[in-house]
Amino acid sequence: MPNAQQAPLKIAVAGLGTVGAGVLKLLDAQASLIEQRCGRRIEVVAVSARSKGKDRGVDLSRVQWFDDPVAMAAQAGADLVVELIGGSEGPARDTVATALETGKHVVTANKALLAVHGTEIAQKAESRGLTVAFEAAVAGGIPIIKGLREGLAANSVSEIHGILNGTCNYILTEMRTTGRDFADVLADAQALGYAEADPSFDIDGVDAAHKLAILASVAFGTPVDFSAVYIEGIRQVSAVDFDYADQLGFRIKLLGIARRTDKGVEQRVHPCMVPKNAPIASVDGVFNAVVAQADFADRVLFVGRGAGAGPTASAVVADLIDIARGRSTPTFGVPADRLGAATPSPMESRRGSYYVRLMVVDRPGVIADIAAAMRDQNVSMEQFLQRGRSPDEGVPVVLTTHDTDEAAMQRALATIAASDNVLEPPRMIRIEQF
Ligand SMILES: NC(=O)c1ccc[n+]([C@@H]2O[C@H](COP(=O)([O-])OP(=O)(O)OC[C@H]3O[C@@H](n4cnc5c(N)ncnc54)[C@H](OP(=O)(O)O)[C@@H]3O)[C@@H](O)[C@H]2O)c1
């Protein structure tokens, strides 16, 4: 039972942007509920950001201000440092390192930092008996880390797949429902604040890959290995692909997939065609979703808001409450010195089916040549769609394949791309039958 007489948990917060200010607001609004739930208060004693004068909609008059978050981590009279600056290097990394070196627990929402340095940070924390908690780093308000690490702790997990980037899911949903092109929808998403001015981390799949690397570690008990993630973003998905996907019974989603196979651990982020009746297919807009395949619990689906001040602060403060209650779990579910290295399965080993869209000259023999290029690599076609005829001009042709190896598919596409009758680089989207 919590002890009502316990001293407050004193925290120092580095970064007062969307998430940092959101955390301070939540702590204020829910102070009595939090005290009731952990038997002690959570008290902000120090903060740090770049601009002291900026109005953040929170009262900072009773907390110590630091211009330098690393100095704050070293000097503030705090039990714990909350890192909400962002980035895998620089002040965020130094703040976390200093907090641990000076005996403070860490709570962070920083997926880039954990994806690149997670194992080393976990080792540093655990060797000092400290906790590093990061629920907010993956899928914002969805309690997926606790869900996997605590809720599914009795299971062996064989696969995780999910919609891990709300910006991409918003763009793909808008493209499907309005028929507009990628660039047009991206500009809108930027105006609405759903996409950054520099959107490349999101739309090129890097943000989703950071989250996937963390999820894979928690799910499989392996060291975080961001460098092993195959990454492909959504820039190449075109408005016409949504029409064809619809006709073929699919939705297009940017997914992160981590799977144990007999060749090793697959980790990949790329656009996927998923059957319209797959649970993940109907998760639209800025929402995130994660599906875990567990041996005893079977299939578990988590859905919710993956970003924004409220949902992300909710996850950060849940971690603070755990620590205030005295709960501690190994960072990635398995003690850091016992995370078992996994063999990465290369992308060429992926086995599955494919959607291919070509722009070809409408001329006798062209389709036969495409079929021959596939046959030569043992790739067997399942469906073939050609809309309209335009003799001697370019016409779009779409085909799907039966299950084949990625390496064979890539060889067939290279042969097809080299043909004079193929007018644009072939577009390929992998089909995932969940
Ligand atoms: N936004 C979301 O919905 C969301 C969701 C999940 C996870 N996250 C993660 O949460 C973290 C924070 O994201 P955010 O959206 O809140 O970012 P943000 O709005 O850009 O805020 C960043 C904060 O860090 C401060 N800062 C930057 N460089 C600093 C430095 N050298 N020294 C001291 N302070 C510094 C900034 O100060 P100034 O305000 O003075 O400029 C700002 O307050 C990131 O790791 C992000 O990936 C965000």
Image (cartoon, grey):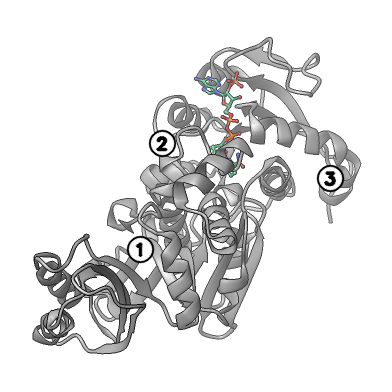
User: Is the residue 247 above or below the residue 393 in the image?
Assistant: below
| Callout in the foreground (2, 3) | 2
Q: Is residue 268 left or right of residue 4?
A: left
Tell me the amino acid under the disc marked 3: Ile
Q: Where on the image, by quarter, is ligand 1?
A: top right
Marks 2 and 3, the one that precedes in the sequence: 3
How far apart in space, not on screen, are marks 2 and 1 (Cα)? 20 Å
Crowding at mark 2 (Cα within 10 Å: few <14, some 14-19, many 20+): some
Residue extending furthest toward the front: 391
Question: Which residue occupies the foreground of this view, 40 or 277?
Answer: 277
Q: Secondary structure at mark 2?
A: loop
Marks 2 and 1, the one that precedes in the sequence: 2
Tell me the amino acid under the disc marked 1: Arg
Disc 1 residue lies near ligand 1 with CB under 8 A: no
Quadrant in which the N terminus appears: bottom right
Q: Is residue 130 left or right of residue 394?
A: right
Q: Residue at x 69, y 10 (%)?
A: 53
Numbered tag placed on residue 268 in the rendering: 1
Marks 3 and 1, the one that precedes in the sequence: 3
Which residue is label 2 attached to? 88
Which residue is label 3 attached to? 34
How far apart in space, not on screen, are marks 2 and 3 (Cα)? 31 Å
Crowding at mark 1 (Cα within 10 Å: few <14, some 14-19, many 20+): many
Q: Secondary structure at mark 1?
A: strand
Question: Which residue occupies the foreground of this view, 45 or 283?
Answer: 283
Q: Residue at x 30, y 63 (%)?
A: 341
Q: Position of residue 331 (x, y in %)?
A: 51, 53
Using the rendered view, name the quadrant where residue 82 is placed: top right
Q: Residue at x 68, y 46 (%)?
A: 323
